[in-house]
Image: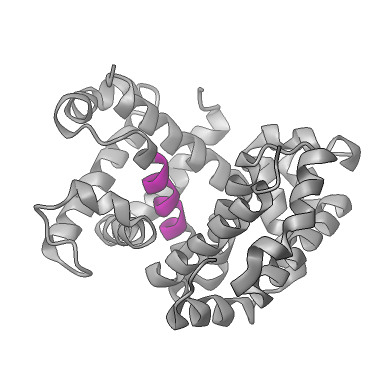
């Protein structure tokens, strides 16, 4: 089980309370597809991903980004049991979606950069550190059921 | 991987802004690195790397100056950083995994300071550019 200090919990919660899940999720997923274009391989059914503008405006990307970040919210609500929270999703990503877990790490880091750009000075090194731990734990939990 | 003309332009545009606060951004990036990835501190046992320390600032400045050289010579990063490449290969021998970590922290610092300039396209160009720099610095390792 992961141990979270009171400070870490506070740093995570204070940022999360101000996050617009729909906007942030959409932006994070769009940036993933733009910065690491090979990740588009999982989204052939999403339609037009031919340019950054197309990706940013793509309604399927937006919707999926929101879905992904909403799921993150579940982890934050259950910091003491992230493994269980993601157990079924882990199986799904392995057995049905066939996503290389490296992509969870990539998306986690992109999310951190999006938070940095939104929260600027408030996204201090200490804040980043707590969030890096969170995205790392989530990525690990999502990879845990792979076989 | 080679940078397109558009990517080179995006790198140069942001650099013009970053250069005005290079020292501070360098120090902040290292602070983020040591905070999020404490294992990176193992390369600096001889330094005072506490927040605000002169050595942290000095080293951050060194790192950003090198990046500036790469920007100025973006068509020949290998040539511009040849000496630094040898230094990292034969003397410093920083494990290659750490270049990704520092690059990520530099992107965080830049995103935090210039959010409206740090568009997805600029983000992509800078990620690619720092990846190029990292490649050059580790290419003589073996």
Position above or below: B51 against A33: below
- Classified by dominant secondary structure, the portion drawn in magenta counts as helix
The outermost residue toward the left is: B46
Percent x, y of residue B73: 33, 28
Residue at figure coordinates x 78%, y 54% from the top left = A89
Residue found 71% across the figure and 52% down from its top: A29
Which image quarter: residue B28?
Answer: bottom left
Question: Which quadrant does the C terminus of chain B fall into?
Answer: top left
Region rendered in magenta: B100-110
Report whether A4 appears left or right of A67: left
Q: Is residue A36 above or below residue B73?
A: below
Q: Nearer the viewer, residue A135 or B31?
A: A135
The answer to whether residue B25 is magenta is no
Q: Is residue A5 left or right of residue B19?
A: right
Magenta region includes residue B101: yes
Residue at position x 39%, y 55% in the image: B17
Can you give x and y, in whole percent of width and height, for residue B77 in the image?
Answer: 34, 25
Give the x, y percent position of residue A119: 53, 72
Measured as percent of width and height from the top left, residue B46 is found at 9, 52
User: Residue visible at 30% across and 35% down?
Assistant: B95
Residue located farthest toward the top when viewing the structure as drawn: B142
Q: Nearer the viewer, residue B101 or A144?
A: A144
Report the colour scheme: one colour
Residue A8 shows in the view? yes
Is residue A64 shown above or below A21? above
Nearest the viewer among A116 and A53 is A116
Residue A49 visible (yes or no): no
């Amino acid at each position: 089980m992961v141990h979270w200090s009171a400070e870490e919990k506070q740093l995570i919660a204070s940022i999360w309370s101000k996050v617009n899940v729909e906007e942030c999720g959409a932006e994070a997923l769009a940036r993933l597809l733009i910065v690491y274009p090979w990740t588009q391989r999982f989204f052939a059914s999403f339609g037009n991903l031919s340019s950054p503008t197309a990706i940013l405006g793509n309604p399927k990307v937006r919707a999926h980004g929101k879905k992904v970040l909403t799921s993150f919210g579940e982890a934050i609500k259950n910091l003491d049991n992230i493994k269980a929270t993601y157990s079924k999703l882990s199986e799904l990503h392995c057995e049905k979606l066939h996503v290389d877990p490296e992509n969870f790490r990539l998306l986690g880091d992109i999310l951190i950069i999006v938070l940095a750009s939104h929260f600027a000075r408030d996204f201090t090194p200490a804040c980043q550190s707590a969030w890096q731990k969170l995205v790392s734990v989530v990525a690990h939990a999502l990879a845990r059921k792979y076989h | 991987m080679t940078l397109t003309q558009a990517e080179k332009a995006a790198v140069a545009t942001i650099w013009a802004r970053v250069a005005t606060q290079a020292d501070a951004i360098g120090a902040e990036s290292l602070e983020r690195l040591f905070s999020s990835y404490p294992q990176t501190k193992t390369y600096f046992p001889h330094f005072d790397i506490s927040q605000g320390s002169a050595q942290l600032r000095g080293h951050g400045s060194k790192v950003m100056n090198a990046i500036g050289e790469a920007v100025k010579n973006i068509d020949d990063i290998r040539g511009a950083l040849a000496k630094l490449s040898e230094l990292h290969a034969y003397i410093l021998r920083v494990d290659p995994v750490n270049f990704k970590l520092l690059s990520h922290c530099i992107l965080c610092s830049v995103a935090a300071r210039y959010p409206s300039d740090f568009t997805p396209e600029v983000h992509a160009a800078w990620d690619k550019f720092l990846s190029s720099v990292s490649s050059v610095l580790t290419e003589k390792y073996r």
